[in-house]
Image (cartoon, coloured by chain):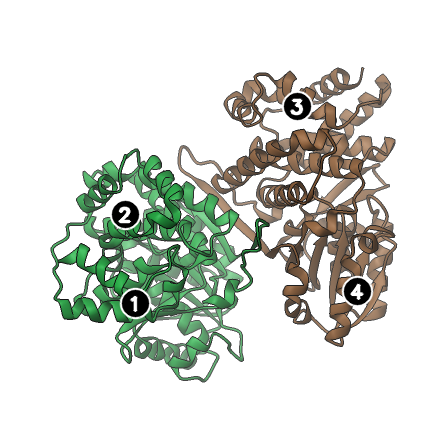
Chain colours: A green, B brown
Amino acid sequence: MNLVHNFIKKNGDNMQFGFKIGTKVLFGKGCLIQNKELVAKCGKRALIVTGKNSAKASGALSHVEEILKEYNIDYSIYDRVENNPSLENVAEGGKAAREFKADFIIGIGGGSPLDASKAIAVLAVNDIEPLELYKNVFENRPLSIVAIPTTAGTGSEVTPYSILTRNDIKTKMSFGNEDTFPKLAFIDATYTESMPYETTVDTAVDALSHAMEGYLSKRITPVSDILALEAMRIFSECTKDLIDNNIDFNIREKLIYVSMLGGMVISHTGTTIIHGLGYSLTYFKGIPHGRANGYFMREYLKFNYEAVGEKINKILELFKVSSIDEFGDIIEKMIKKDLSLSSEEIKNYAALTMKQRSTSYNARQVNEKDLVEILEKTFL
Amino acid sequence: MNLVHNFIKKNGDNMQFGFKIGTKVLFGKGCLIQNKELVAKCGKRALIVTGKNSAKASGALSHVEEILKEYNIDYSIYDRVENNPSLENVAEGGKAAREFKADFIIGIGGGSPLDASKAIAVLAVNDIEPLELYKNVFENRPLSIVAIPTTAGTGSEVTPYSILTRNDIKTKMSFGNEDTFPKLAFIDATYTESMPYETTVDTAVDALSHAMEGYLSKRITPVSDILALEAMRIFSECTKDLIDNNIDFNIREKLIYVSMLGGMVISHTGTTIIHGLGYSLTYFKGIPHGRANGYFMREYLKFNYEAVGEKINKILELFKVSSIDEFGDIIEKMIKKDLSLSSEEIKNYAALTMKQRSTSYNARQVNEKDLVEILEKTFL
């Protein structure tokens, strides 16, 4: 992941940063149909990459099929993307793309199908073992990707990252380079309307986490900070309705906008220890990704306060609360925490999180003992 | 220019917008040398496009030559870009690119060389009359462009626009599509240090104008608004030092950051009547572009107040002034206005401005009589 922005350095007081969003975004109700000719320009043979349900339930799949038929674009559907797709899973998708001779990929769904699309776009044209995805350098340029989110959290439609489950080391890990940014993202809150309440909340908290971790990362840039603040500001307008399950189109549109901003933020900053810790909860306990992130927010903010207290105060101000605990209470009203961990599990998760590169981006320098403490305070 | 974001529509209260910045930005002192391998990846034969002076004076040209030599990249220098380059001028540059068989373009300078680079990148691989640039559709994809600004105003390094002088209709007019975004922009305030004071101020006012016109355009997007506000906020921190000619590296860095943000803004919104009116002052009176824009700011804000008063108040708040006139006074402390126009000139300029597409993007609907009034109030 570092490959995308490894030129970001701090150099005394001078600004030093990079900016790159390789995706063209079309945002708004009806944006896909209104801009269908852009899809048609992507190629002649599309592999649609999706999971079993959301593409259909959201209505996005039928819109895509309608467009592909209108423009006589051949397509095949690979709908076997798992939740938290594994290397084995995307290898199968890559095979499907090669066999179909796809010349572009259309990813429809939440983070799992969108992230899988990126891996499949690489594997379709590079005869490599899936583990080699993590080299981040590919002989052949990945196929173009069209991304259509059906959740509002991942931001994957505007990031180069593909987060895959590695069963070999029992965690999730991301790859991505500038060529794995989707070429096009169609962001229409309509496609998120079929999301159940719990998924809506879990994914929304993921979006918040991207903005927050990006804002408190060592790799901040001036532009990512502006976008992160705006994302958190708009999220804060939605918290009451999220808690009350009072989620109309207007809220959904705000949430998918927050999600997009969060994606733009982490495209520059990456994530930090919240994501690293969360991966273990997802891998070992099956906790949905966003919810797992949310569990750690309270202790994450407390831990980082000595390093970036002023910025954390700014977040509290946006949420109109006067303490980290008050903020933590809001998050826990959204995501009920009914999980406890053994000391052994905690030790294991802390050790795994230390291996994530993103851990080094955390505002305050962190060691394994710190992570054990955060886990203990959260789950003991 | 519409081609880039012609999908922006207002649809009731729902958000409807596009986002695309096709440029990878490297920002900061030393960014070019630190990331020289990115230049090396652009091709094997570079045409350097620049004017007579600033590329050399800024030090950017010698850095570029050093890099090209290190990587054994053949290059040729086309340094005949005029101020406000004409179609004839870029046609000559295009010929130079074809004859040299350039496979990428490196533009170094202010808006003139950077804008010329985009036209030359198109003409190098498309055998068309320069007037056909305005079709915005080209058979062959333009050469890749590396942009290195030596002024802090144009923002051209992150826009697709190329603004060229049309002697046939006696004004400046822009073309550009998604393929004319520079591929890379190296934004280092060091290269602006050799700018004389007047150019520093004139170009800074241009950057402000991009942010302001973008913020008050009919084509605003949520993201462009955030960037525009940030640009104006940071500009406001520089006004005193600009007026006092107290311009250190820190101020220069802020200004080139404002310029970049302004470019990102107008990549989405385009400009409005300030630019349209300013083109006539530049074409007929030789007034530098940014200064020409600055002349109109006071009356522009007054004219638009009834349409976007709340947003204008926000601008005044950022500048810590309580009236448009107070704001106008600040601008006029930077750019001395010693120009008067005849009634006939005013009539002519108003008519020419009505022909600019950007005039239709102005927040308040505008007709020729309105423009005459703005010109009269400014110059009679």
Task: Determine which residue is flagged by label 2.
Answer: A193
Mark 3 on the same chain as mark 1: no
> Which residue is under mark 4?
B47
The structure residue drawn at horizontal position 20% and vertical position 42%, both measured from the top left corner, is A329
In the rendered structure, the residue with mark 2 lies on which chain? A
Residues at discs 2 and 1 both on one chain: yes
Q: Which mark is in front, 2 or 1?
A: 1
Amino acid residing under circle 1:
Thr
> Distance from label 3 to label 1 (Cα)?
55 Å
Q: CA distance from mark 2 to mark 1?
A: 34 Å
Q: Mark 3 highlights which residue?
A: B300
Q: Is the C terminus of chain B in the top left, top right, bottom left or bottom right quadrant?
A: top right
**Residue B252: x and y, percent?**
68, 43
- Asked if disc 3 and disc 2 are in contact, CB closer than 8 Å, the reply is no
Closer to us: A147 or B209: B209
- Do the residues marked 3 and 2 share a common chain? no
